[in-house]
Image: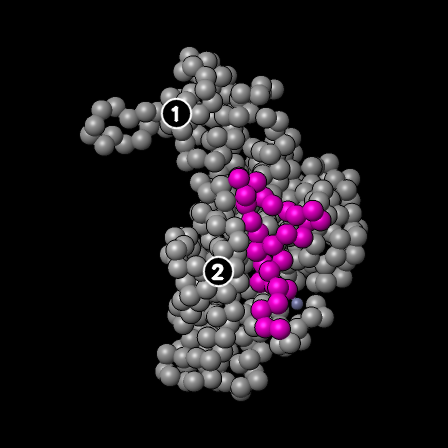
């Protein structure tokens, strides 16, 4: 059992790429001798490892402490496509094993199918059930503030489904549910490009658009779990009807679904966003106008987020080959032209590719994140 100081050490290490005992002592306001004693126990328990960075020629480099990859394992399942993807990750966020099954949206049958798949998945890597810390599940829709109930998911046809409890009964694991964009933000926070950022926003750009915010190192879920729903912010009052019942939502202008609809409306000879970009490069005015409209709307929304929250970083997670060329250029220009000149260019913007497996890994990160934040201060 770790004491409060050791739990704090875990948190510091998860938020860094390794830390020396001296740096840790400074951050925790403890003596180096006290840190050494705490760390010794954790090394002995197999939670930490030491690594020696290469010397830069200026004296002996400090030994860095890191979490051991095999100190804990997590499972993640994504319910976002026709196939359920279930992955096993280690404490470094590496996907060790993966399995897929057809999605049966009946919650009972889904829980039973996931529970049945777990023993085979972990056996592939020789991991026993007692080495698993938890299971995260990501889905499209609303999740309640306790991350236990799917309040509503149009994609799954669910309303108030207590999936976490159902899965816990079937698997014996601690289970947490999360909306897709929030799960991806958690994944980038603990394993990815936002590791060192305490305040950042992730925008997921795909068939729909999502976002999630971290404030002061914590995921902001909102009073009802609904924070970050930018897809249905009105960008064009009185614009195109949206599936939510309103008009002119960001989703109707900038999502891949909206872009494809515009391609069909204008009967363009393009079957993908990459082909649309190629038409734009060749000077096709309809292709240029579609990409401009989408890019302007997305850039305006991101500018508003920057203006409201002043984040350290914006991460745009996009489908492969669907955020290059003109779309990206217009988004960046639109951000610059809609923020106050005094803050223009001050917020770094990272872009990352998302694949089907990214969502399952993100789900597993939610289980890891819950494990980390549940550690008492
Ligand atoms: Zn809408």
> Closer to us: mark 2 or mark 1?
2
Q: CA distance from mark 2 to mark 1?
A: 36 Å
Q: Residue at x 48, y 49 (%)?
A: 311
**Image coords of residue 116 (percent x, y):** 71, 45
Q: Residue at x 55, y 25 (%)?
A: 7
Q: Residue furthest bottom?
A: 267
Earlier in the chain: of badge 2 and badge 1, it is 1
Q: Is residue 307 left or right of residue 119?
A: left
On residue 303, which mark appears? 2
Residue 192 shows in the view = no
Q: Secondary structure at mark 2?
A: helix
Image-quadrant location for residue 248: bottom right
Q: Image height check: is 133 above or below 187?
A: above
**Image coords of residue 323 (percent x, y):** 45, 66
Label 1: which residue?
23
Residue in the foreground of this view, choosing between 224 and 338: 338
Q: Residue at x 69, y 41 (%)?
A: 175
Q: Image height check: is 45 above or below 313?
A: above
**Decide: marks 2, 1 in contact (CB < 8 A)?**
no
Q: Secondary structure at mark 1?
A: helix
Q: Magenta segment range?
A: 209-237
Give the image quadrant in which the ligand numbered 1 is located.
Answer: bottom right
Residue in the foreground of this view, choosing between 237 and 293: 237
Residue 245 shows in the view = yes
**Image coords of residue 147 (percent x, y):** 70, 44
On residue 96, which mark appears? none
Q: Residue at x 39, y 59 (%)?
A: 341
Q: Image height check: is 338 above or below 225?
A: below
- Residue density around tag 2, few if under 14, some if 14–19, many if 20 or more, within 10 Å: many
Residue 225 lies in the magenta stretch: yes
**Image coords of residue 211 (percent x, y):** 57, 56
């Amino acid at each position: 059992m770790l004491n409060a100081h050791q739990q704090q050490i875990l948190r510091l290490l998860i938020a860094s790429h390794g830390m020396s005992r001296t740096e840790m002592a400074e951050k925790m306001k403890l003596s180096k001798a006290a840190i050494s004693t705490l760390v010794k126990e954790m090394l002995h328990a197999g939670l930490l490892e030491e690594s020696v960075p290469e010397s830069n020629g200026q004296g002996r480099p400090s030994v860095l402490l890191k979490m051991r990859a095999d100190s804990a394992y997590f499972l993640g399942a994504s319910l976002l496509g026709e196939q359920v993807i279930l992955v096993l990750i280690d404490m470094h966020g590496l996907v060790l094993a993966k399995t897929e099954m057809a999605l049966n949206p009946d919650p009972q049958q889904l829980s039973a199918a996931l529970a049945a798949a777990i023993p085979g998945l972990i056996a592939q890597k020789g991991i026993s059930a007692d080495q698993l810390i938890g299971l995260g599940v990501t889905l499209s829709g609303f999740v309640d503030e306790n991350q236990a109930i799917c309040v509503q998911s149009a994609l799954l046809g669910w309303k108030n489904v207590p999936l976490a409890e159902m899965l816990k009964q079937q698997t014996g694991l601690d289970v947490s549910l999360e909306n897709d964009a929030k799960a991806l933000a958690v994944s980038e926070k603990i394993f990815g490009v936002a590791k060192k950022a305490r305040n950042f926003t992730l925008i997921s750009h795909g068939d729909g658009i999502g976002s999630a915010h971290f404030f002061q190192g914590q995921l902001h879920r909102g009073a009802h779990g609904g924070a970050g729903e930018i897809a249905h912010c009105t960008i064009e009052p009185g614009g195109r009807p949206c599936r939510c019942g309103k008009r002119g939502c960001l989703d109707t202008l900038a999502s891949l679904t909206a872009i494809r609809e515009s391609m069909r409306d204008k009967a363009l000879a393009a079957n993908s966003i990459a082909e649309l970009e190629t038409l734009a490069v060749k000077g096709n005015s309809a292709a240029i106008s579609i990409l401009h409209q989408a890019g302007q709307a997305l850039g305006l929304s991101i500018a508003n987020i920057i203006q409201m929250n002043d984040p350290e970083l914006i991460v745009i997670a996009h489908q492969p080959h669907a955020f290059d060329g003109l779309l990206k250029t217009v988004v960046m220009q639109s951000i610059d032209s809609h923020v106050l000149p005094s803050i223009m260019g001050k917020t770094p913007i990272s872009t990352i590719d998302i694949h089907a497996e990214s969502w399952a890994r993100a789900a597993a990160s939610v289980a890891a994140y819950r494990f980390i934040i549940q550690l008492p201060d």
